[in-house]
Image: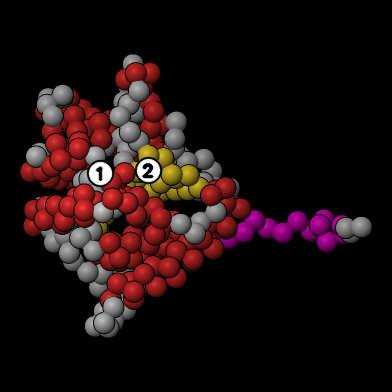
């Protein structure tokens, strides 16, 4: 069984029944005194392989890869970018962090700002939050009704299908943490002055809607999962296991593509550099 198979959303997916502390099956032995160090070493090695394959990915100038990271506050979107994609060449990759929309973005359809950031040929793009925010937060706060929510799910399915049909590989990761773990991480930020910059009072305000967000995520995931734009629910109470799972899935996808460098140019053999 691949790691992707372990965390791929199933047809009977229920978020509240999903363990936020589940481990990666088949990972290196974790009975050692410092299991986190083992996870980090494995992830580092996987990240190096991802970086190697990215060179071929860029050179081929064919496929496009879009990685979508969604999750509750403190679930580790920034940490995933650093831990999994920190070794890839930034010349062939971008991370896009979507914040609250600007007035110009509000004046257009909600997918307008998203479409501008999708990957070009040979490019890897990581979305830190994404178009799903325009269903999740809008639904939780009552800014859209159920009918509009259903319409937006349809928009998103069509949008992602169009991307897939025009050469974009899509991997969607929901970083699943427990409410207790979020509480611990927020308290950790408050207790450490060097982490105060990461604390936002809005995180506490949104935490009050925890149950509503869990329902919204479950509905969104079930409504938009597809073979060409699959959802993976990644247990994220453990930061190191989270990174290990995502790195494994990304590498599995890249390896499955059988990437190759473009054919050599025979004329180059005749060129002499003086």
Question: Does the magenta-highlighted stretch encompass residue 266?
Answer: yes
- Tag 1, which secondary structure? loop
Q: Is residue 161 left or right of residue 222?
A: right
In what quadrant of the picture does the C terminus appear? bottom right
Q: Position of residue 99 (x, y in %)?
A: 33, 33
Which of the marked residues, 1 or 2, is nearer the chain's N terminus? 2
Q: Position of residue 136 (x, y in %)?
A: 19, 36
Main SS of the magenta part reads: loop
Please tell me which residue is depicted at 25% across the width and 44% down the height of the picture. Answer: 199
Reading the image, the residue beneath label 2 is: 127
Q: Nearer the viewer, residue 152 or 173?
A: 173
Question: Does the magenta-highlighted stretch encompass residue 204?
Answer: no
Please tell me which residue is depicted at 34% across the width and 76% down the height of the picture. Answer: 38
How packed mark 1 is, by other alpha carbons closer than 10 Å (few <14, some 14-19, many 20 or more), is some
Q: Nearer the viewer, residue 126 or 151?
A: 126
Q: Position of residue 144 (x, y in %)?
A: 15, 24
Alpha carbon distance from label 1 to label 2: 21 Å
In what quadrant of the picture does the N terminus appear? bottom left
Q: Is residue 215 left or right of residue 66?
A: left
- State whether residue 112 is above or below residue 28: above
Q: Quadrant of residue 269?
A: bottom right
Q: Nearer the viewer, residue 264 or 6?
A: 6
Q: Quadrant of residue 97?
A: top left
Q: Position of residue 42 (x, y in %)?
A: 38, 72
**Bounds of the magenta span?**
257-271
Colour option used:
secondary structure
Reading the image, the residue beneath label 1 is: 199
Please tell me which residue is depicted at 62% across the width and 59% down the height of the picture. Answer: 261
User: Are the residues flagged by discs 1 and 2 in contact, CB closer than 8 Å?
Assistant: no
């Amino acid at each position: 069984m691949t790691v992707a198979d372990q965390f791929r959303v199933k047809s009977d997916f229920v978020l509240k029944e999903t363990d936020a502390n589940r481990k990666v099956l088949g990972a290196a032995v974790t009975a050692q005194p410092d299991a986190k160090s083992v996870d980090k070493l494995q992830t580092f090695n996987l990240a190096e392989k991802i970086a190697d394959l990215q060179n071929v990915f860029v050179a081929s100038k064919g496929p496009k890869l879009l990685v979508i990271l969604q999750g509750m506050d403190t679930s580790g979107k920034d940490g995933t970018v650093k831990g999994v994609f920190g070794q890839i060449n930034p010349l062939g990759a971008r991370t896009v962090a979507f914040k609250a929309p600007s007035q110009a973005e509000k004046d257009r359809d909600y997918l307008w700002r998203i479409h501008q950031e999708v990957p070009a040929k040979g490019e890897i793009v990581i979305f830190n939050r994404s178009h799903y925010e325009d269903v999740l937060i809008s639904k939780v706060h009552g800014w859209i009704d159920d009918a509009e929510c259903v319409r937006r799910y349809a928009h998103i399915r069509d949008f992602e299908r169009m991307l897939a049909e025009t050469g974009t590989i899509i991997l969607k990761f929901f970083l699943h943490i427990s409410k207790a773990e979020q509480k611990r991480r927020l308290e950790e930020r408050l207790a450490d002055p060097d982490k105060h910059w990461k604390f936002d009072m809005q995180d506490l305000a949104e935490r009050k809607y925890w149950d509503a967000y869990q329902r919204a995520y479950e509905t969104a995931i079930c409504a938009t999962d597809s073979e060409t734009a699959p959802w993976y629910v990644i247990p994220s109470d453990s930061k190191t296991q989270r990174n290990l799972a995502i790195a494994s899935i990304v590498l599995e996808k890249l390896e499955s593509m059988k990437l190759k460098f473009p054919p050599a140019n025979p004329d180059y053999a005749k060129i002499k550099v003086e």
